[in-house]
Image (cartoon, rainbow, N blue to C red):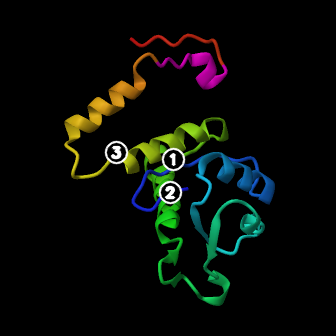
Amino acid sequence: MRERQGDVVALPVACSGANMVQEQIHEHVVDGSTIYTDEHGAYKGLDDLPYQHETVKHKAKEFVRGDVHTNSIESIGAILERTAMGEHHHVSVNHLKRYLNDVCYRLNEGSVEVHVKDRVSALCRMCAGVTLPRKKLTGSRRRIELA
């Protein structure tokens, strides 16, 4: 999800069914917002919720209709895919939320208008006091010692 000209929010979901997707929309989107989607079945019924809903019909070769499009959010999926293949080489389902958070952070804080020192400072503030024990990361208690 992304607010136009706003921050990106990406969440792993167990399935792409209407109940799961609409639950996440309801949790993260302010009532009265306008939501632009493609014609995926998970978005059917959004008109019955407290949102304005506009759809572009990709199957009918409609990709933009005035301000209605999904181009910016689709590019985020492409960025995630390129990051997974080019940087991580493998993405574990167990850590998918972390990979998504990494991509969202880069997109939300990566503006060339913000000096790199300020972006690094923001990252350090976000990580302060956060620990990730090896057991939680890997499921193993085994110690690794580096020579």
Tell me, yes or no, whether the highlighted magenta stretch contains residue 26.
no
- In the image, taking residue 39 as reference, residue 80 lies left or right, namely left
Figure check: 110 above or below 127:
below
Q: Residue furthest bottom?
A: 60
Quadrant holding the N terminus: bottom right
Q: Residue at x 57, y 60 (%)?
A: 33
Rendering quarter of residue 98: top right
- In the image, taking residue 117 as reference, residue 53 lies left or right, namely right
Quadrant holding the C terminus: top left
Residue at which label 1 appears: 89
Residue range in magenta is 130-139
| Tags 1 and 2 touching, CB below 8 Å | no
Q: Position of residue 2 (x, y in %)?
A: 50, 57
- In the image, taking residue 9 as reference, residue 127 lies left or right, namely left
Residue at which label 2 appears: 2
Figure check: 8 above or below 70:
above
Q: Residue at x 39, y 51 (%)?
A: 107
Q: Position of residue 126 (x, y in %)?
A: 40, 28
Tell me, yes or no, whether the highlighted magenta stretch contains residue 136.
yes
Amino acid under label 3? Glu
